[in-house]
Amino acid sequence: MAHEFTAKLDTYLDGELPASEMKALDAHVRSCPSCAADVLSRVQVKRAMQTAGKRYSPSPEFRSRIQGQIAARARVSVGRMWLSAAAVILVLLVATPVVNYVGQQRLRREQALSEIVDLHVAALASTNPVDVASSDRHTVKPWFQGKIPFTFNLPELQNSEFTLVGGRIVYLHQTPGAELIYQIHKHNVSVFIFPEQAISPGLRTGLRTYRHLYFNVQTWNEGGLTYLLISDTAPQDIGKLAEMLKAAAQP
């Protein structure tokens, strides 16, 4: 859509487009940072040309003839041009901090996802991926008591496709948490549980699903804790386990 409007920008700044096209271009420029920057650049060029033109003074007769021909159009054009320029500058002033903020949030989220992926890969690569090896939730859950500063519930897996392998203690920014490992269709699923404050804000905004490298990640908050599930299995498998964990967490 930006390419469609680029050829019309100079005519737009001169206020020579039909009213309907002026309105459409006004709306587009306000929402398109690329075109907004282009318009601002063209406005600066026009201003430089106006300044350079003042070095030469036309004769009174020439001035009178030209002014008589373009006076009406010039008033409208200049008014529209500066209104458009002001709108563009406002868009840039507002859009730049927003774009920067969004970029920073995305970077923080990617960094947080990378940290979680590293923990998952470390477990996969280890010859002893769990500290407590058991398929019995009543064995695994009590093992964590006194080792981490929170408690959690585990779901009953009977009649499900999942198998509990065991668990281990992991650290994120020096905060201890739990990693539980489940299997489904020969794929390992890591379930990380940390206090909310240990997790990047970008991963603490409700139920979310991400794709990072070759892994699917699902995360949500529950009772002051953040749960993160990660695996290379299908997203629907992760979703099923997530629903079981959320149900188990309910009082």
Image (cartoon, rainbow, N blue to C red):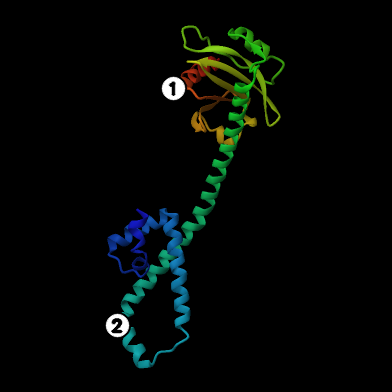
Report crowding for label 2: few under 14, some 14 to 19, many 20 or more residues within 10 A (C-alpha). few
Circles 2 and 1: CB distance less than 8 Å?
A: no
Determine the CA span between mark 2 and mark 1: 71 Å
| Spot occupied by residue 6 in the image (x, y as percentages of width and height) | 36, 61
Callout in the foreground (2, 1): 1
| Spot occupied by residue 62 in the image (x, y as percentages of width and height) | 35, 90
Q: Residue at x 56, y 37 (%)?
A: 110
At label 1, which amino acid type do we have? Gln
Q: Could you say which quadrant of the image residue 172 lies in?
A: top right
Report crowding for label 1: few under 14, some 14 to 19, many 20 or more residues within 10 A (C-alpha). few
Task: Look at the numbered disc 1 and give the secondary structure of its residue.
Answer: helix
Residue assigned mark 2: 69
Q: Could you say which quadrant of the image residue 148 lies in?
A: top right
Residue 172 lies, with reference to residue 188, above or below; the image says below
- Left or right of residue 45: residue 227: right
At label 2, which amino acid type do we have? Gln
Residue 183 lies, with reference to residue 235, above or below; the image says above
Instruction: Tell me the number on the disc at residue 236.
Output: 1
| Spot occupied by residue 46 in the image (x, y as percentages of width and height) | 43, 73
| Spot occupied by residue 231 in the image (x, y as percentages of width and height) | 52, 24
Residue 106 lies, with reference to residue 136, above or below; the image says below
Task: Look at the numbered disc 2 and give the secondary structure of its residue.
Answer: helix
- Left or right of residue 69: residue 113: right
Ranked by sequence position, the earlier of labels 2 and 1 is 2
Instruction: Tell me the number on the disc at residue 158.
Output: none
Q: Quadrant of the C terminus?
A: top right
Q: Is residue 91 visible?
A: yes
Q: Residue at x 37, y 92 (%)?
A: 60
Q: Is residue 225 visible?
A: no
